[in-house]
Image (cartoon, rainbow, N blue to C red):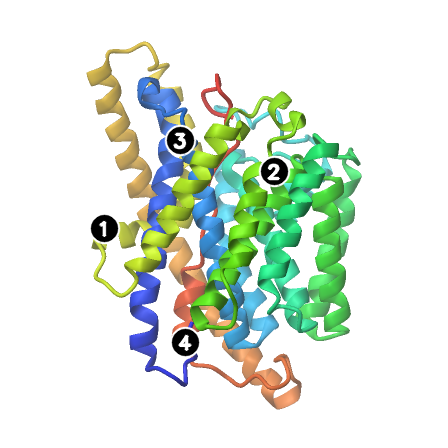
Amino acid sequence: MTSASALPVADAAVPRLAWLDALRGIGALAVVMEHLLPWFVPALRPYWFSLGIYGILVFFLVSGYIIPASLERHGDVRAFWISRFFRLYPLYLAVIALVLALAWWVPVRAEVPRDGSAVAAHATMLLDVVSVGGVADTMWTLSYEMVFYLVVTALFLTRGHERSGLLAMVFAGAAVVVGLVASGAVLRGGWPAYVSCAVFAVGLAGVLLGRLRTVAACALGLMAVASLLLTSRIPWLGMAVLGVMFAGTAIHRWERGTGGLWPVAVTAALVAIAPAPLWAVEGGWWWAQADVWITTMVLAGATFAGGMALRGRRLPRLLVWFGLISYSLYLVHHPLLKYFVQLGGDLRLAALPYQLGTAALAVALVVGVSALTYRYVERPMQALGRRVSRRCRDGGERGGDARMAGQGTRDDRVLGHEEGQMPDRVGDHVGQGDVLR
């Protein structure tokens, strides 16, 4: 991205954010369809590519493209993490409360442990990374976003954040190697959730308070990567996701003229073959089969490239709006679909017109509730987070330095909007014969 000093804020930010929001809208709608079709209109569900994996790949590319750029421009890890908490946790906790409150009607999924490890894993969002199911099925992707934040923070404070292309290739290569030797978590049990929660709490306290900030950030980054390798439910997928996200960062650096595209091409090739080992296919993941996986990757990459090509043009307002509410769409749609089916019954054998009509009602419900949660939960909490971040930054300027040396204060109008509309996580693990997992 162009620095705030090079272009006026409005000129630099608005068109770029519109195309990013449009990509988020496409990703969110893809995942909603991935979860809606098996229950409402199963005949329309595609199997030549995975709608859900397509959506999350688009989101992970957007995350990799924008998150490090925002952190670098702002130069303040404390402000970054404050914005992350106020962006992610309020709605996340509200959805958890809703699911638990209605557990007497629709029980919490069996993949959620009935002990303290579930609390610890949900507290850190490192759910899939410590092999704990989320109370809402789609929460698994938050694990990899959180790992990315932890790794990027450590790289930023150690000045290793500009090696995006190399990092993308390393993680993609690791995905291939891990896929050859591990089909699941090496270390099992509830203790990884407790250990990661303790390291997460202590490490982030150090990052936020400035006590041994770099040491704390490195400990968090190492914990995150070690968890991906040793305790993650699908280790090769975690490595592949980080490769995809750093590929997004490499694309950003290429756009700025500070890097090439060849690392992105190498990363794409490695990620394409990552699920090829027998372990992945034997795991029952139909979307990991070579033809489906590669087709899904190509579609996601083409979508991102198309968004970049159109970033200077006016985009459909509705699609951009879907991007604005995409985090709400991601978190609330799956529970709402479950409740809808619980009330309406099994529609898989119903007549097609009835299926389509009911599906339209369900989509209207999901979109309406998502708009409300965005308006009354997300936006107010994001605004509060910006105020808290600004106060902490002002206090740091008077009494201590929370900013990297050499980094100046940037215009909050750019960063505030971008971090208020950060890439959102969508998707779910899907199986050939399932309805929803």
- In the image, taking residue 262 as reference, residue 3 lies left or right, namely left
User: Dot 4, crowdedness within 10 Å: few (<14), some or many (≥20)?
Assistant: some
- Residue at numbered disc 1: 318
Q: Going from the N terminus, do you reach mark 4 or mark 3 first?
A: 4
* Secondary structure state at the residue bearing disc 4: loop
Are circles 1 and 4 on residues that touch, CB within 8 Å? no
Identify which residue is drawn at 37% across, 53% down.
305
Q: Residues within 10 Å of mark 1 (few under 14, many from 20)?
A: few
Q: Between disc 1 and disc 2, whose residue precedes?
A: 2
**Which label sits in the foreground, 4 or 3?**
4
Q: Which mark is residue 34?
A: 3
Give the residue at mark 2: 274
Q: Position of residue 394 (x, y in %)?
A: 55, 84
Q: Residue at x 31, y 59 (%)?
A: 309
Identify residue type, mark 1: Leu
Disc nearer the start of the sequence (2/4): 4
Q: Earlier in the sequence, mark 3 or mark 2?
A: 3
